Every structure is written in structure tokens, then in C-alpha cells.
Image: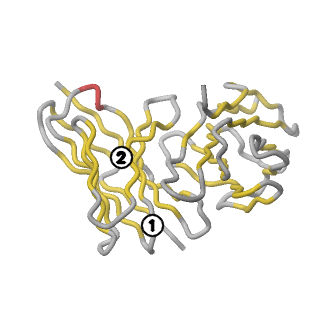
Amino acid sequence: ELKVEQNPLFLSMQEGKNYTIYCNYSTTSDRLYWYRQDPGKSLESLFVLLSNGAVKQEGRLMASLDTKARLSTLHITAAVHDLSATYFCAARGSQGNLIFGKGTKLSVKP
Amino acid sequence: DGGITQSPKYLFRKEGQNVTLSCEQNLNHDAMYWYRQDPGQGLRLIYYSQIVNDFQKGDIAEGYSVSREKKESFPLTVTSAQKNPTAFYLCASSWTGGEPEAFFGQGTRLTVV
């Protein structure tokens, strides 16, 4: 059974600092997703990672995937307040369904 | 515009009532999903469907039912058997092959009154 774990679950950062969110998954999965959720809102797709070594970047966010280690990371560079949100990773199960981590609540402070 | 539409945005249910949440997509996606999110929690899978007239239970299917009579539509019924239905419900859809990015609707917030 596929399980997805994120850490940390809460992250308080200062503006301008760098940090990384980690996403481990327990069994083989061919796709890894990162989403952003603002309070009371739906999920916004950030990245889809398909292969070992895949790296995608958008603005201050960069996601990578290591399928051998079953690990994906979301790296935040020079954080700004607008990045405050909850970030979820999800892995695709064998039946095509998405299994989500519990989310990382990011708070960026001046 | 292509997208995935959930309705209503807010829904209030009395004890013992069944209610149905609507989810429609015009993205021509094969797969559709229903998730439940409780405050401060992640998303838990209720049901999913890969093709028309077929669906599978997720982790928390008890007290819920679905149908997939059309490719575009995947309604979720919250039955009276669901004892704690107050939550935020999210519908998603994706292709099943290629690069299947999953898109989410805006959600329905269900409250028991």
C-alpha cells in the first residue's frame, strides 16, 4: 500500500531564506505531484515529475525527484510572503489514484 | 474555457439527509476523483473512476456513493450513514496516460446543521 509522508508539517521561515520540504513515498510510483493550497481554496498544480532525476523550476520553487530513494523535494529560494500556503505532495498509486501527504504549512515572515 | 466545476460551493445538510455534490469536467479526462479534506488535514480519497460506468472505493468510502454514467460527470452522494460529513470536498480529474496532471475543482464545503 502506497503511503506518502511529508516533512516538516509546519515551517516558519523568514523572508529571503532558503528551505526544503521533503516528500517520501513507500512503494514504486511513476508520478509525483506538488500542489499549493491557500486557506479556504482548492489545490493549484505546481509540478508533475515523471522520471528519476527530473527537476522542474517555477520562480522561487524548484522540485526534484529521486525514484531510487523514493524521495521528492520542493526547494524554496529566497522566500517571500506570497509563498505562504500549504504545500502538498502526492504520488500516483497502482490504480491511477493519487495518494497525498498531510501537507506542509509554510509561513513566511518579514 | 476548459475546467472542472463543482457545485454548490456551500451546502448545509440536516441530520439524516442525503445530499449530492456535483462535479463536471469538460477537459475530456478519463479519470475522476473525490477527496475529503478536514481542517488542517491532508486529502483522503473517497472514490475514483477511471472509465465510464466503473468506479473504485478509496480509503474512506463508507457512507458515500458515486455514479459515472457520463465521462463528464462524477456526482458524490453523502448518505445519512456518513456520521461526520462536515468537511471540504474536492473533485479532481486527469488523463490516465501520458503526463496526467490532475486538476481540481473549487471545492464544496459541507456543513451539518
Residue drawn at the location 76% of the way across and 36% of the way down = B21
In this view, the residue in front, B6 or B41, is B6
Identify residue for label 1: A30
Query: Dividing the image into 4 quarters, which one contains the N terminus of chain A?
Result: bottom right
Front tag of 2 and 1: 1
Residue B8 percent coordinates (x, y): 72, 26
Say which quarter of the image contains residue B91.
top right
Q: Chain of mark 1?
A: A
Q: Are marks 2 and 1 in contact (CB under 8 Å)?
A: no
Query: Dividing the image into 4 quarters, which one contains the C terminus of chain A?
Result: top left
Say which quarter of the image contains residue A81.
top left
Q: Residue furthest left?
A: A16
Q: CA distance from mark 2 to mark 1?
A: 22 Å
- As displayed, is residue A65 above or below residue B26? below
Residue type pointed to by label 2: Thr
In this view, the residue in front, A2 or B1, is B1
Residue type pointed to by label 1: Asp
Residue drawn at the location 72% of the way across and 28% of the way down = B7
Q: Chain of mark 2?
A: A
Residue drawn at the location 46% of the way across and 68% of the way down = A29
